[in-house]
Amino acid sequence: MKDPALLAVGATLLCAVFAIAGLHIYLSGKAQRQALEDRLSATGHHTLGRNRRFTAVDRRIRRTRLGKKIQLKLAATGLDLTPGEFFVYMLATVVALWLIAANVLAPFFGPIAGLVGLWSANTFLNWQRQKRIEAFINQLPDLARLLANGTSAGLALRTSLSMAADELEAPAGDELATVSAQLAVGRSLEDALDELAERLPSRELVVLVTTLILSNRAGGTIVGSLRNLTETLEERKETRREVRTMLSEVNATAFTIPCLGVGAMLMLNTMNDGALSRVTGTTLGQVLILISLGLYAAGFVVIRRLGKIDV
């Protein structure tokens, strides 16, 4: 035991055993984590009913900041897409628009079309999110009515929320099911409702959430407040519908103007083959094209601003 050589050999073997055991534990934990991520990705709230595509891309992009932002936006839209699928589809759309613009118009328009593709992807997510918010707002009167009926029958607010999740269709049913699941695992009612208001921000939902939280804290009668809120939400629903109908022509004009500009360039290039290539072949032509495109974009933004009225 006093031989230094034997001590060195024993210490080396012991370190090797520890290293092998540590490597085995690390690889086992990594495999379990990957299996858990795959299972959550396959059985998530918006990912039921089909096999997922581009799983390798999805696993990698979820670890990035861009992937986390895409995942948060997709969670608020209700789309049956994973971040990896959306990223691949977005990249394919950008490449397709780049090639089409470069071949149909001129090579100068390829990068511009790619940027338009990126903007369109983000706009599509925002539009889907707003569409889901609008659908949820339209269901708020029914939700307030169900909560008022359940509370007046002597049910707890948590039970009323669970019953409303079963009665209402998507998106309200899905969102309330998420809230009920959070409450079932021990999350507080205030945190669950606040997260719901953050996912689907709207004045109507904030009022409803505030009413529920204050009534839950103070322990007062919630039935009368919910019934009054139901009538108010019904009136706001009709008002929003009338305003949307009145502004439909303005919103259509905002999209028509850029389409006219693109149509004019296509017509010019068709009548005089290669005209856009010759125009964009000089620095002055490129600057003028960028200025004109900027003016079209400014007109689109201004008209959209004029047609945006918060009710």
Image (tube, rainbow, N blue to C red):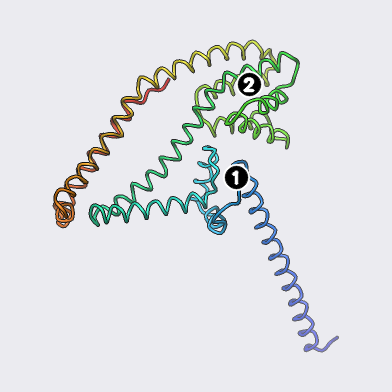
Please give the name of the residue rendered at 74% of the width and 76% of the height, measured from the top-left corner.
Answer: 15
Mark 2 lies on residue: 212
Residue type at mark 2? Leu
In the image, farthest residue toward the front: 271
Q: Can you say whether 171 is above or below 282 in the image?
A: above
Toward which corner of the image does residue 239 lie, by quadrant?
top left
Q: Earlier in the sequence, mark 1 or mark 2?
A: 1
- Residue 1 is labelled as none
Kindly state the secondary structure of the residue where label 1 is placed. loop
Across and down, in percent, residue 257 comes to: 25, 35
Q: Can you say whether 39 is above or below 220 in the image?
A: below
The residue carrying pointer 1 sits among few (fewer than 14), some (14 to 19) or many (20 or more) residues within 10 Å by Cα, namely: some
Give the position of the C terminus as an image quadrant: top left
Toward which corner of the image does residue 306 lie, by quadrant?
top left
Given residues 64 and 134, the one toward you in this image is 134
Kindly state the secondary structure of the residue where label 2 is placed. helix
Mark 1 lies on residue: 47
Across and down, in percent, residue 192 comes to: 64, 32
Give the position of the N terminus as an image quadrant: bottom right
In the rendered view, does 293 fall on the left or right side of 238?
Answer: left
- In this rendering, the label closer to the viewer, 1 or 2: 1
Q: Can you say whether 257 is above or below 291 in the image?
A: above
Please give the name of the residue rendered at 60% of the width and 51% of the height, measured from the top-left corner.
Answer: 51
Tell me the distance, in whole angstroms, between the alpha carbons under discs 1 and 2.
30 Å
Please give the name of the residue rendered at 47% of the width and 36% of the height, measured from the top-left corner.
Answer: 128
Please give the name of the residue rendered at 66% of the width and 13% of the height, measured from the top-left corner.
Answer: 223
